[in-house]
Image (cartoon, helix red, strand yellow):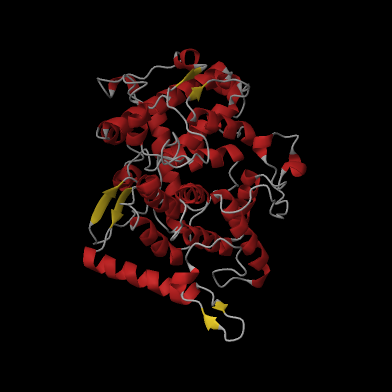
Amino acid sequence: MAPLKARGGKPILVDEDELPSARLSTGDHKILPRPLAADIEQFAVADFAKRYFSTHKTGLIFKRRVPVEQMMSWQKGPLQAPLLVLNRSLHKDAVKCFKVIQKVMGDRDREKPVAVKDSGTPNSSLGPAAGKEAFGIGSVLEEERWMLTEGLAHGELRDEIYCQVVKQLSNNPSPESTFHGWQLLCVLLFTFPPSKNLEAYLRSFMQERLTHTESRIDIMAKYCVARLAVISKKGPRPKPPTIQEIESAADAAFNPSTFGESLESIMRLQLRTYPDSKVPIILPFLADSIIALGGPKREGIFRIPGDNEAIMEMKVRIDKGHYNLQGIDDPHVPASLLKMWLRELQEPLIPVELYNECIQASEDPEEIIRIVKGLPSINRRVLLFVISFLQLFLPETVTSVTKMGSPSLALVLAPNIIRCESDSVAVVLANSKFEHTFVHNLIVHLKCHKIDPDYIPTHGIAAGSASGTSTGRPKSSHRRAAT
């Protein structure tokens, strides 16, 4: 088959700055000289406090301004007004958010409900029958989900929530409350980022606690610093997390997810249980699940999304180490989860530094194969697994049913395999056709069994063996006590 060619034009290369770069868990990032970076960070923290904190006053007769240091220190009682300058329509919700934070951290009676309103988003973790009656009835987790929903709905409220958590973590006399507060910070960094104005302030707060070993703060601070870099780049979630996702995110510093991590971290995570596996075990499980549930006979496979509740439930189950298909009968669910796993990788499957090279070679199968051979081992093997799996859907007997030929498969999978890191929408849109062409030529021309002499991908054997098994990773319960 002749290689697919992009329709006219040339790809727009993503420019590299003159600044040096640092290799972090989230990829290659440009860095400033250390003294200059430190000065800017210190200025940003002070400038944020000066410009955005609301003026609080105390005293019955002679009112005096409350210093920022005092205002941003733990308090037992409720908050009378927002910490930041907010739109007046958000003041009541901001005060309610503080009560929720106090309940989550154990600083407020958990039996006393916070009068939150139904956000209109059903609590999927309670099942379809729960609906509006189950949302906002006083459960701490439900109130926490309400707060996250409000943060997603009102961008202005996000910084207020972050600052309230930082306040309750500052000079907190209770190690247990402090531990729960850091767990809440992990959940926030899973849901939405702070504004660019607050980012430096929040990073500075977390970095100052990287050496605090009491209540295992150092572990959570290190995780939160890494999560801040990731979510600041990716942006907020499209939907509020489910109750189960909140529980998983709260413990993520100690039990990392299989989703949203780097390939290296995922391989380390499974090393004890699957020492001989050369790709993340989630890949053969999801691929073989798609086959077992009749994916090659389902129209629109990989294009039609699965049920969101089923996807989230299966995701949480996998993160707990349970690889099984209990209650799942739709191949669109594992197919959607496969795309999600690829899309949420901290670093793209095709490394950022090879992006320009890939889009320039998108019409040249031989050059594409050369690039694949030069990928880091784990990236190359994951790519070989994914492409060889997609090639199972190419026979005419399959495409006549699925209506998903190689161009269609490439169209829906390309954004999950190769990513344009440009901030320009025009560049992203202009390069999308070259990304599509690159992935299409991978699907059509890559001989996956000839690329890596130490790894030949196989399919159809893992779903049965993994069904009902566990990775053996112990999962701690949400809101565990500090030790």
Q: Position of residue 121 (x, y in %)?
A: 69, 46
Q: In x, y percent, where is residue 405? A: 52, 28
Q: How many marks?
A: 0
Q: Which residue is at the front of the view, 5 or 388?
A: 388
Q: Quadrant of the N terminus?
A: top left
Residue 358 versus residue 186: which sits nearer the camera? 186
Q: Nearer the viewer, residue 423 or 244?
A: 244
**Is residue 34 rendered to the left or right of residue 27?**
left
- Depicted 284 relative to depicted 24: above or below: above
- Quadrant holding the C terminus: top left
Is residue 456 visible to the viewer in this orientation of the structure? Answer: yes
Where is 276 relative to 61, above or below? Answer: above
Image quarter for residue 281? top left
Q: Residue at x 47, y 71 (%)?
A: 70
Q: Is residue 21 left or right of residue 285?
A: left
> Percent from the top left, x then y, of residue 387?
41, 27
Residue 33 visible, this orientation: no
Which picture quadrant has residue 242? top right
Q: Residue furthest bottom?
A: 62
Question: How far across and how far down the image is residue 192, in percent?
Answer: 52, 53
**Residue at 46% in and 57% down:** 172
State the residue in front, 283 or 178.
178
Residue at 61% from the left image edge and 60% from the top image edge = 154
